[in-house]
Image (cartoon, rainbow, N blue to C red):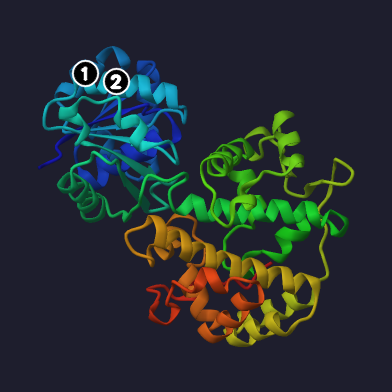
Amino acid sequence: MKIKEITVVGANGALGVGVSGIFASFGDVKVNMISRSLEKSKIAIEKAGNSVKALKVCDNMKPYTYDNLEECLKNSDYIIETIVEDYSEKERIHKLINKYMKADAISSSVTSGISINGLASCYSEAHKKSFLGIHFFNPPYSLPLCEVIPSKFTNKDIAKFIKNYLSKILNRKVIVVKDEPAFLANRIGFMFINQAMQYAEDYKDNGGIDYIDTILGKFTGRNMAPMETADFVGLDVHKAIVDNVYEHTNDYAHEKFKLPNYVLDLIEDGRYGTKSGEGLYRNSDEVYDIKTEEYRKKKNYKIDFIDKVIEDFKIGEYEKGLETILLDNSIESEICIRFLVDYIVYSLTISKEIAENITDCDIAMAEGFNWIPPIALLEFIGKEKFKELTSKYGYDKLMNNINIQNLKSNYQYEKFLKAKR
């Protein structure tokens, strides 16, 4: 199998642009870019070139509209649908792809959680084996994680070919996951974010949103605090992901995916976050106060253990910083420790259930979220101390089937622990 020409359907969206740029540059293939208008496709080509910082790859991309769908698909080795996350719209497009794709072509839906088994029903028996899901992270050039999601009909050799192509040709960090709600990386990441939203409501008297974000700041191993991340992604997008998981799963963390009412209220008011100008935060210095239901200035919370940890991290004293967190007896340090333990436990249990390898959770979070990988964090905390903490929080039964002694991370935790709030 060789990929010389591809068609990207929905090429003018953020992911369509990013994916087109990746294929045109790293893959050096001809990319047919289909949008609702020729002008949109032309603009998308320029954006795609800028996204990979190489305008010369624009020569590999050609602008088309949906009127040209049939002629593009008949010549394409690989078809990638990147339209809006709406099942009925995707279903409509994939029925057309099935109608026009050539016999030996491969087709994919780029999605963050829509059922791949469901979309496979759009295809004839001859084409079902050549269809699978792909989850690129946005922007693809900066976030190299790519989740491959075979349907129950996907030919194993085709899934293996796509995995190798994405990895070896397009330089993606690829994991293969089962067709489960939100797949792996978003399942872990949005559990953490939604749990932070719930804690913000529980601790609204202490400050709420910016209070919890301070406790779970950059020093805990992420570039952006969890609720700042939700604003950046979009609260409406966050809702779609956690609602999907809440409705279609029932694991031990089920209730952690229930969206708090104050977030629902913000969404109903059109306050989606960064893209609408306000959400959990507004501007760079205001935050939504859950108690008063008004925006206020962000607070500079005086939390002693955080300041001490940051000073330790600045000089490379990571173990000393960890000891500061573990020995502090404040409410804030207890919240911090609980979140870190929950993050590791959920990552391991879900990865074991839906990924090819339990260690894939490290790849998922490092390469898709730029968060500290769960197993690297486990090694930082120490396996014996982690066992004590899981027992303290009642996770003994969950962890019985996971031998943490055999787990080893390929990532260095120091890279992710920032000496910043």
Amino acid of disc 2: Lys
In percent of width and height, residue 3 lies at: 15, 39
- Residue drawn at the location 25% of the way across and 55% of the way down: 167
Q: Is residue 242 left or right of residue 123?
A: right
Can see residue 209? no
133 or 354: nearer the eye? Answer: 354
Circles 1 and 2 in contact, beta carbons < 8 Å: yes
- Residue drawn at the location 80% of the way across and 55% of the way down: 202
Farthest residue to the front: give it. 397
Q: Is residue 263 left or right of residue 179?
A: right
In percent of width and height, residue 5 lies at: 17, 33
Residue labelled with disc 2: 95
* Disc 2: CA contacts within 10 A as few (<14), some (14-19) or many (>=20): some
Quarter residue 196 falls in: bottom right
Can see residue 133? yes
- Residue drawn at the location 72% of the way across and 40% of the way down: 263
Distance from Cα at disc 1 to Cα at disc 2: 6 Å
62 or 34: nearer the eye? Answer: 34
In percent of width and height, residue 99 lies at: 21, 18
Q: Secondary structure at mark 2?
A: helix
Residue labelled with disc 1: 99
- Residue drawn at the location 59% of the way across and 75% of the way down: 390
Quarter holding the N terminus is: top left
Amino acid of disc 1: Lys
Quarter residue 132 falls in: top left
In percent of width and height, residue 418 lies at: 59, 70
